Image (spheres, rainbow, N blue to C red):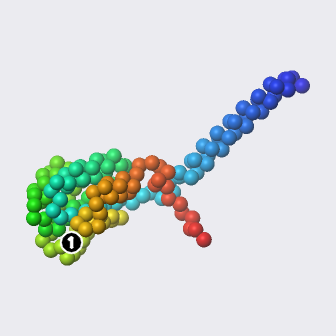
Amino acid sequence: MFLSYSVSIIIVSLALYGLWYVLKDVWNWFTALELVPLPDASFIILLKNMEYEVEDLMRYLVSEIEEGVHGIDAVVVDCGSDDLTPIILQRLAGEMPALTIIHSRSSIRPLTEAMPLCRGSVVHVLDLTTRLKNEEFMAVVASLLRKQKGDIAIRSRTEG
């Protein structure tokens, strides 16, 4: 035998430690593998009378969209606001090319007007008129546009 017992224990320990990290890297690579390319997405945002909040919310949405790598656009539907919301939206649309603005006078079917303007294959509808609060809107946008690879991994296996 060429090495002493303590040296051989250290070498075996280092080999097992290295094997552990190799297996861990292979597992992380396998579980975060993107098997299917993600489709482009669109947001339809319905809002009404939000002159105080609309600029901050749209700037947040556009900043999250610009950080992402996928093609995402947003169609903002003003459902007949009585305040300065349409003017603010027009100014924001001039500054931000990712936003498309629609001024709908009838609040009955605004989705039928907005759907043809969506460029994405997947459409997310966010209703700020009655359903979502500002904090919930920001949380939904952050969760839908999450950038970590582990969050966008798609598995082709079906659960049985």
Asked whether, in this view, residue 64 is left or right of residue 22, the answer is left
Residue 8 point in image, percent of width and height: 81, 28
Residue plotted at (39% across, 60% down): 39
Where, by quadrant of the figure, is residue 53 drawn?
bottom left
The quadrant of the image that shows the C terminus is: bottom right
Residue 109 point in image, percent of width and height: 21, 75
Question: Tag 1's secondary structure?
Answer: helix
Up/down of 16 relative to 104, above or below: above
Residue 52 point in image, percent of width and height: 16, 54
Up/down of 18 relative to 56, above or below: above
Residue plotted at (27% across, 49% down): 60
Q: Which residue is mark 1?
A: 110
Inspect this view and state whether residue 46 appears.
no
Residue type at mark 1: give it: Pro
Where, by quadrant of the figure, is residue 15 drawn?
top right
Asked whether, in this view, residue 38 is left or right of residue 116, the answer is right
Asked whether, in this view, residue 155 is left or right of residue 60, the answer is right
